Amino acid sequence: NVAAETVTTALHAFTDQPSETDDRTPAQRRAHASVRICQVALAQGAAGTRAGATVTVIVDWATFTGGGLGRMDGQFTGPIDRRHIEQLLCDSPISRVITGPKSETLDVGRTARSFPEPTRRAIIARDGGCRWPGCETPAGWCEVHHHQRWHNGGSTSAINGVMICPHHHQFLHRNPDWATTFHEQQFRVFRPDGRELHPHPWSISQLCELLED
């Protein structure tokens, strides 16, 4: 029917193509496509006069900066993994709500985007799309990653921002044993054993590794 065709077409349009550096199953890639479709829908806003939907995450600042246990809750889903919070802080509108000891609201700050639009446009013009080696996700489907983490003092600037697709952005935050460098606009990725991840499976270094094996 038409509804099934609509959903299938949307999933097809937003599903990443398989690549050498993407080990997700087809079902996992379709699941990520579903999330991406929802993100686009939320960004466009709801129809009519209804207020626009915003993903809300409540984090105790002392908990987040101190590394201890505390509140990190979604508005509807309950506790959220700290690594996912760190990913959100890279490239999301952030607003401040300060509450007192009895949860009464004391102050509500203005919403501010992590990367202002002029900076975002500069990064898009420079990167073109996901900078992960071998990934060809276009800029419209990517997020801007603070190479030096924002909560560790990293600046919200083009020199510290690199364009990453949601899949590889999440991978970076969930796998701190993988290292990256971003020097003179060159983004490089290294496995936990120190070997560099190259964009092509038949790069010289990887060919040497295969011959050694």
Image (spheres, rainbow, N blue to C red):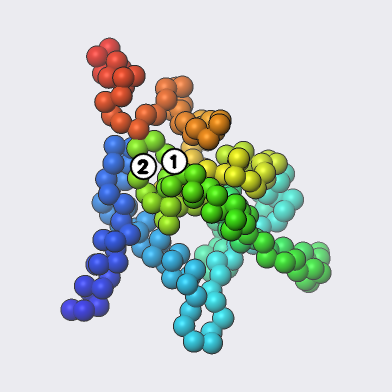
Can you tell which quarter of the image residue 95 is in? bottom right
Q: Residue furthest top?
A: 212
- Comparing 125 with 76, the one in front is 125
Q: Residue at x 28, y 29 (%)?
A: 201
Residue 183 image offset from top left, x and y in percent: 56, 30
Q: Are marks 2 and 1 in contact (CB under 8 Å)?
A: yes
- Comparing 82 with 47, the one in front is 47
Quadrant location, the C terminus: top left
- Comparing 204 with 106, the one in front is 204
Q: Is residue 87 left or right of residue 67?
A: left
Can you tell which quarter of the image residue 197 is in? top left
Quadrant location, the N terminus: bottom left
Which residue does the numbered mark 1 point to in the structure image? 131
What is the CA distance from the residue labelled 2 to the residue labelled 1?
A: 7 Å
The disc placed on residue 135 is 2
Q: Is residue 213 visible?
A: no
Residue 82 image offset from top left, x and y in percent: 58, 49
**Relative to 195, is 58 above or below?**
below
Three-letter code, disc 2: Cys
Three-letter code, disc 1: Arg
Q: Residue furthest bottom?
A: 49
* Secondary structure of the residue carrying numbered label 1: loop
Residue 65 image offset from top left, x and y in percent: 71, 46
**Relative to 205, is 162 above or below?**
below
Q: Residue at x 52, y 43 (%)?
A: 162
